[in-house]
Image (cartoon, grey):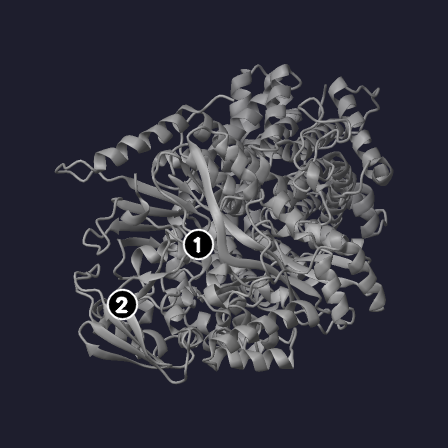
Amino acid sequence: MRLPRRTLLAAAAAVPTVAIAQTVTGADTRPVITIAVQKIANSGTLDPLREQSSNASERWLGSIQETLIARNQQGSLERVPGLATAWRRIDDRTVELDLRPGVKFHNGDELTAEDVAFSFGPERMFGPTLPADIPAIAHRHWPALDRVEIVSKTTVRFVNKTPDLTMEGRLSAGGSEITSRRAWQEAGDWQANSQRITGTGPYKLRRFQADNSLILDAHDEYWGGRPPIRALRFLEVPEAASRIAGLLAGEYQFACDIPPDQIGPIESHPGFEVQGGLVLNHRIITFDEHHPALVDPRVRLAMAQAIDGQSIVDALWAGRARVPAGLQWPFYGDMFVPGWTVPKYDPDAAAALVKAAGYKGEPIAYRVRNNYYTAEIPTAEIVAESWKAIGLDVAIEVKENWGQVLDHAGPRGVRDWSNSAVFDDPVSSIVNQHGPDGAQQQDGEWTNAEMNRLSVELETGTDRARRKQAFARMLQICEREDPAYIVLHQNAVFTAKPKALPWRQPPSFFLDFSARNWTA
Amino acid sequence: MLRFIALRLARSALTIILVVTFAFAVLRLSGDPALAIMSPDAPVEAIAAFRHSWGLDQPLYIQYVRYFLAILHGDLGQSMRDGRPAIDLVMERIPATLALALPALALKIGLGMPAGIYAALHRNSLTDRLVMAGAVAGFTVPSFVLGLLLVLLFAVQLGWLPSGGDESWRSAILPVLTLGLGGAGILARFTRSAMLEVLGQPYIRTASAKGVPWGAVVRGHALPNAAIPTVTVIGFLIGSLMAGSVVVESVFSWPGVGRQLVVAVANRDLAVVQVILLMVASTMVAANLIVDLLYGVLDPRLRNAVAH
Amino acid sequence: MSDITMPLPITAAPQRRRVHMPPSVIAALLWLAVMLAIGILAESLRPYSITALDLRARLTPPIGFGGTMRHWLGTDELGRDVLSRLIVSIRISLMIAFGATAIATVLGTTLGFLAAHFRGWVEQIVLMLIDFQASMPFLILALAVLAFFGNSLPLFIGLMGLYGWERHARIARGLAIAANAQGYAAAVRQLGARPLRVYLGHVLPNIASTLIVSATLSFPEVVLLESGLSFLGLGVQPPMTSLGNMVGYGREYLTRAAWILLAPSIVIVLTTLAVSLLGDWLRDRLDPTLGD
């Protein structure tokens, strides 16, 4: 196949650009990088709390604002110093952090404890002058934060009302970004600030046009080293084919959200590669246990056993996703329950369970969105066939929005969903979504008394061993005894780029363009 | 004349009210803006707080009455996504859509009409068949397929034009082509059909028999008479520009109103959708009025008819 | 849109002519006959079920491009046979297009006649409905149907029937008003004919040619609209399939497995061409004012 001239030039051009940037010249010879993404921000704002640090905003948020405790994007997301150089526990509910000296905000101010306290204070996070959903989301991130004490200009203390072993995790998670007090107050209210964003990150906001583009300039005084790129241009390109076309034509240097089936065609062009990897997100299918056919937990377990997750991963994800060990990630560190798996693929056993449960042939609705999740429709069609093969009458219903998916009318059966690890503790995922305050129970799809007791233990307990036991028991309940959901596979995200650009995809949605991640 | 315009305005106002009410009912009854904007992964209490702050937990008829009264006061509402006034959001994007729609309309008329007239004048010749085949090819290929094929050819393979975005005037070439070629085909067919009907009229044969040069017959008799149904079709094409924009703006990531409508509908962002609908409805009404007045200009027999 | 009536061409008595079909029209008729046959016999013709997955045979090319006899037109992203899906899609799309065109033509012509006959406020209401239809983006109508009625084919056909009825209504109304002013209509009425007879027996045949052109234009537009809706996620929903649905979902594989999108696209183009050629020929035959 004839290689487009533009493509060769594009791939070749990247190399000398990077080389030139490193020579000492008067002019700024750093490259300008254009990134084509599917969506820049779901909410049309730049506020991490309104955006809830969505997949979309996670791509660029870390380039602008940072957290006190960072995650090693060049490693496995373990905790590393960020805006705080050290931290220590004072007691079960207090964490003290030393702030990094000499950190400059985009507006020139130096980071002090006042900015930290402000970022977690009433004007920015918890107060009544904010739109009502902002404090609600903030309270989810920090359910029991009492206050942020300014111990000195460079020392802060986070004090919780109740004992909480996960505070360090929360400090490293989305929603805990630090903003400049002066910048916020100068802009005015939340409304004005939602279209601006000031932080300490390697790039600062130049211009944001919702649903269109986000342009960032290098923040040369970044504490982590002079950014290697002069300007970042995030462009919203909804069609995957258009993103890929623009990449191959040399207009974009990065094309994000690449469907797995396009990896081969892109890599068949010499000079281009697709980087990708697993992210902290699992695709799941949830049950409404009130459906007459789903009341019996054996039917639900059978549905889990009927699905060959590995064949889905191999067929639709080019083998680059993974069937995980239940609803957990190695990211949990100590809290990871070893030896746990999803139910083994066994269609015969599943069919037997369905018969034993006395399934009467009631049709089960399987509500899905039109590829809201990557490959959602093909996955649903494979899964539906698997269920038909064990004797269930399943009908796919494609819904146009979430309100219709969750609509109580028309017996709800099963539906698609996903679950993320907001920080490195099961409280942030399984309890967050399937616990007593989680959407599944609040929506009336499922409930379990023991699960709810264990959730409270996990949220307030301080004995690590007991918490881990509680989590192991939760997995047992939610995935075997009284199934609440089926874990299909861990998600992966793919980014295409010219091979010549010295960039590596972090194991997350974040596109790290700091000097740390741009090593020739 | 005045009575005519007054009647038209009254009917237009009623139509617009109907459009607004229908859209309100459909958007409210078929989805939840809170879930769409905040996503189902959001905390339940945040979704409830969001609903409450926008009055979405009120009974439907109360929401409608409040909404309607606000419009009457000139308050077209705010976007539920970022709180900015809906009218500002739409106004920002209109120039981009016009930058595609107007050249596309010019392309449709400038390419379609001459092609149709030429085909009619050379009926049943090879040229006629070729032009008609080309016209059919133009409007039978789905616009997003045409757009993607153009991108693959001109952006990826040849590298002559950008594949998307709105950086320079060159970025508009492929979207305008995609938007305009289909309509050019439709217009060509209709123009040919209208010309053929007119050319078969006795007065054409009479003029020709009298010795008037064929060119003058065409210019003086055929074209003006064929103009009327052709103008009608052009009116239809203006209406279809909006629909075409939706697809083309998505394929070429062009920041226009069409794409904005799709996003706003998906988010059930009522205020933004309604502003766009009001705009579209008003444009249709204005276009209709202009076309009817044009009829009066083009056909002297209809000038009296205008008065009822 | 238009309140103004259009002058009707002067009609002469239709003449009998020997039927002469140019080869292109014969080819068009043949193609349409084949499409109709496929549409009717779809369930017996297709080699596989449209949902028969084969994950180990994904995206295999058609015969002649590296494929096997097992799948003449290759397979799609789930290993389903493209030929089988194409056959069933033709059936579904033909049903949609015929049904929708019929509904749009009958609905539009009836409302147009009603407006022309009764004038007054009936006409104003019809004109208002026409304006409403023209102003409401079809996106919202399609969304409403999908939301309230789900993926039901009869209702989807009804929805598509709403597309374009306003064109037929305007044309019918305009021409009917003009026809009413013509001598022959008055004469027939003076002879005692009831209005229905006047419209069906005298006015309709005279405007048939314009309506036919409009209908032949509707047919491909419905198919294209269907693919546009699939592009937006609002068309025929899986697991049901249609030409528009195949094109919409196949666009992602344009570079890697073009046959998924090209097969239905070629069918759309050829069928539309055939309908247009046939329509043009019919119109030429029916319009008595056109000399040879």
Question: C83 and B139: which one is in front?
Answer: C83
Label 2 Cα crowd, 10 Å radius (few <14 / some 14-19 / many 20+): some
Residue at image x 53%, y 29%? B113
Measuring from the top left, give residue A60's x and y in whole percent. Answer: 36, 54
Q: Residue furthest left?
A: A26
Looking at the rendered structure, the kind of residue marked 1 is: Ser
Q: Quadrant of the C terminus of chain B?
A: bottom right
Q: Is residue A235 left or right of residue C9?
A: left
Report whether residue B275 is seen: yes
Compare marks 1 and 2 and give the one earlier in the sequence. 2
Q: Is residue C119 above or below residue C210?
A: below
Measuring from the top left, give residue A445's x and y in whole percent. Answer: 65, 73
Q: Secondary structure at mark 2?
A: strand
Measuring from the top left, give residue A173's x and y in whole percent. Answer: 39, 65
Residue at image x 60%, y 62%? A339
Label 1 marks a residue whose chain is: A
Question: A146 and B31: which one is in front?
Answer: A146
Question: A233 and A468: which one is in front?
Answer: A468
Q: Secondary structure at mark 1?
A: loop
Measuring from the top left, give residue A97's x and y in whole percent. Answer: 27, 72
Report whether residue A294 is seen: no
Looking at the rendered structure, the kind of residue marked 2 is: Ala
Residue highlighted by disc 2: A86
Instruction: Indicate which disc residue A508 carries.
Output: 1
